[in-house]
Image: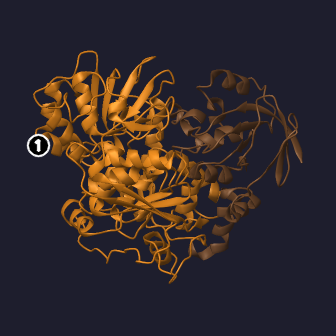
Amino acid sequence: MSKARVVLALDDDVSTDQIYPGRYMATVLPTETPQYAFADHTAFNALLRSGGVAAGSVVVAGKNFGCGSSREQAASALKGHELVIVARSFARIFLQNAVNLGLKLVEVPDVVAAEGDDVALGLTEVTNLSTGRRFGIKPLPPARQTIIDAGGLIAYTRKRLVGKGAAV
Amino acid sequence: MGMTVVQKILARATGRRVVAIGDVVEPAVDLAMSHENAALVINQFLEVYKDTGLEPKPWDPSKIAIIFDHRVPAESSKTATNQKKVREFVAAQGITKFHDIRGDEGGICHQVLPENGYVRPGDVIVGTDSHTTSHGALGAFAFGIGATEMASVWALGYAMNVEVPSTIKVEVTGALPDLVTPKDLILQLVGKLGAGGATFHVLEFHGEAIRSMPISGRLTLCNMAVEAGATSGIVPADEETLRYLREEAGVSDIAEPMVPEPDAPYERVVRLDASKLEPQVACPHTVDNVRPVASVAGTRVHQVVIGSCTNGRLDDIAIAARILKGKKVARGTRMIVFPASGRIYQQAVAAGYVGDLMHAGAVVMNAGCGPCLGVHQGALGDGEVALSTTNRNFKGRMGNPASEVYLCSPAVAAASAVTGVITDPRNGGGR
């Protein structure tokens, strides 16, 4: 169980345009994308860039977080700040990108938390330490867990590729 | 129990007789598409091979398609340098399905693929673009993936960890009235399902309105399936699919199309009556915030956009030209048009549509994604309103979080360009 601060609370349907605006999409490298995380949310972006957000801090959101574009920058930008995203549900491509890159997502269908709350992230439930309420975690589909366990999709693919040997 | 069309496709692509919903499969990929984000795919692809001692070679360069469309011509030196790197990779790897910035064979990936015959019924298609769902219009199972996942596909030739999705059957009876279009149909459906209502599901389209709809309209429907969160949209192949492949895409060797079995396990059925449909508008800032045009009629519009992978096809430009011919775009309103491909642009010129639109005051730009994703070619000022035939109206989507985007059909867009306010094309403005 790890304890973390909620640094940003968002509504339903947060799009990848909000997480990583299209005008920065020419920036592709995971080492360079974090500067544009939530770029149009100027206050939060400035806080991230100032180093004022501790690794492991939590962004809480409603349903369908990461909807819209398949841009992987949305996941790599958040991964670069080592944020943890706790949402009521996730859009499919964003969820897969996050798994592939090692961005930590926690799906909690009825989560309620506000900015400034402290939460404890367990294996099966999230506790809002500021309100005392507990919420059940919906596990990721099992096929996703194998990628996480391998250390991300690049490592997983590399393993497959080397295993395939002569076929390459 | 029978199988849905996507189950049948995944069974074929995994060499199995049957796959069940929820099975985790690794289907062989028939086409792997990227656009400018191939720059990131290449980076991740090289990363996969690092320290393996293996030479980085894609599994089958003939099954990779790369189309420049998001930022064409390049809006910055950074993009131009990315595009240059991709060109070098394409040349080094012998990738033949490459469409550069050209007026003859260039355009938006979701038009270039079908019009060149790269999409066949029954194919498994992945693309590093969420609107890859479009290609379900030709009976393929097509879905969006991220760049790292594409790097994995380039290396291995199959997609990993694909759960066989549940399917929602969408049955559309009746015929669309004049000036009511496939865009209105999909907007209504997205409004009904909600922005996440079809997440991890496929939307399979059936019914009289679909059977009588040309491929252009089916592309509009499947394109926006993702706006309800769907993994993909699909229209099982029929006579119209075969006609399109033969006559417009130059494909002669077409395999027997796959159709769903009568007892296929649909999770649910959504029924719509096309004959009762009115023009629809998606209001800011979510695509599922859909209302009949009448309820927002009169809203002042500063920029009208016609184009994109959703509505930049000849039918879309034709209906706009029909409405605007002999009329003028209202002063105080800008109208910009982006044909979906160079081929469509040329057809629109030949048919006189481009002339009609320009005489009316529209600016007809090069084929490409244009301002849809907020990079260039039509930024909005603070407090301005765009009315657009594109597919997303998220806050900041067109580059300015202090602006608003409404989504609509080409008919609504054209009629509204004439009046300068959101207008029902069936009563005024347009005729």
How many dots with numbers? 1
Rendered colour, chain B: orange
Task: Between residue B396 and residue A26, name the one nearer to us.
Answer: B396
Q: Position of residue B295 (x, y in %)?
A: 36, 31
- Looking at the picture, does residue B141 appear above or below residue A51? below
Query: Who's the residue at 65% across and 68% down the image?
Result: A160
Q: Position of residue B5 (x, y in %)?
A: 43, 71
Query: Who's the residue at 42% across and 18% down the image?
Result: B381
Task: Between residue B46 and residue A68, name the one nearer to us.
Answer: A68
State whether residue B256 appears in this view.
yes
- Looking at the picture, does residue B54 appear above or below residue B386? below
- Looking at the picture, does residue B379 appear above or below residue A168? above
Q: Amino acid at mark 1?
A: Ala
State whether residue B99 appears in this view.
no
Chain assigned brown? A
Secondary element type, mark 1: helix
- Looking at the picture, does residue B303 appear above or below residue A163? above
Specify the quadrant that holds the C terminus of chain B: top left
- How crowded is the residue under tag 1: few (<14 C-alpha within 10 Å), some, or many (20+)? few
The residue indicated by pointer 1 is B350
